[in-house]
Amino acid sequence: MSTQNQSRSKYKTKQRDVILSYLKTVPGQHITASDACLYFKEQGIAIGQSTIYRQLENLVDEGILNKYIIDANTPACFEYIQREEHCDHDVCFHCKCEKCGKLIHMHCDELKEIGEHLMSHHEFKLDPKRTVFYGVCEDCR
């Protein structure tokens, strides 16, 4: 980690710790920066929106959060990583419901085979963390 990143991650340690504590309460869930802002506002915790955005990005840089950018019309979402429990970083596809917008993790060996096929037959390396299948979730069907 560069000196600049070290100093940035140590800046406003109290806010970082409060944000990290919140993220630990929602493991495996995808949250947006707006979700975090709303949570802190409802809890009466004064943390500015720009601080939340900055700290989320710092936590991504530190490998504590995953950041998912689904498309240009959807805000980025973040996921707290419990390293020992998180899905294999090589096989972590997502499904997005076109009705409610829910983002679902896919832990599926068959999808891993698609990535292997693309590589061996088409010389294309798929990035599963950025691969999203669109459709309709069980709740919306």
Image (cartoon, rainbow, N blue to C red):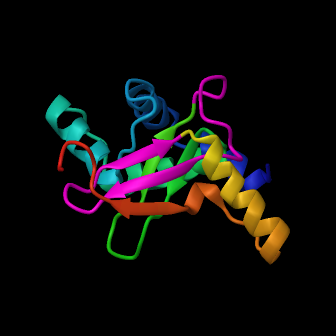
Q: Say if the magenta span includes residue 9.
A: no
Q: Nearer the viewer, residue 131 or 63?
A: 131
Residue 35 percent across, percent down from the top left: 27, 46
Toward which corner of the image does residue 53 lie, by quadrant? bottom left
Q: Main secondary structure of the magenta part?
A: loop
Say which residue appears at 65% left-offset and 42% top-offset.
109
The range drawn in magenta is 82-106
Q: Say if the magenta span includes residue 100.
A: yes
Say which residue appears at 39% left-offset and 44% top-offset.
30
Say which residue appears at 70% left-offset and 59% top-offset.
115
Residue 131 percent across, percent down from the top left: 55, 62
Residue 81 percent across, percent down from the top left: 57, 34
Q: Nearer the viewer, residue 69 or 15?
A: 69
Q: Nearer the viewer, residue 31 or 110?
A: 110
Q: Is residue 16 left or right of residue 99?
A: right
Say which residue appears at 67% left-offset and 59% top-offset.
114
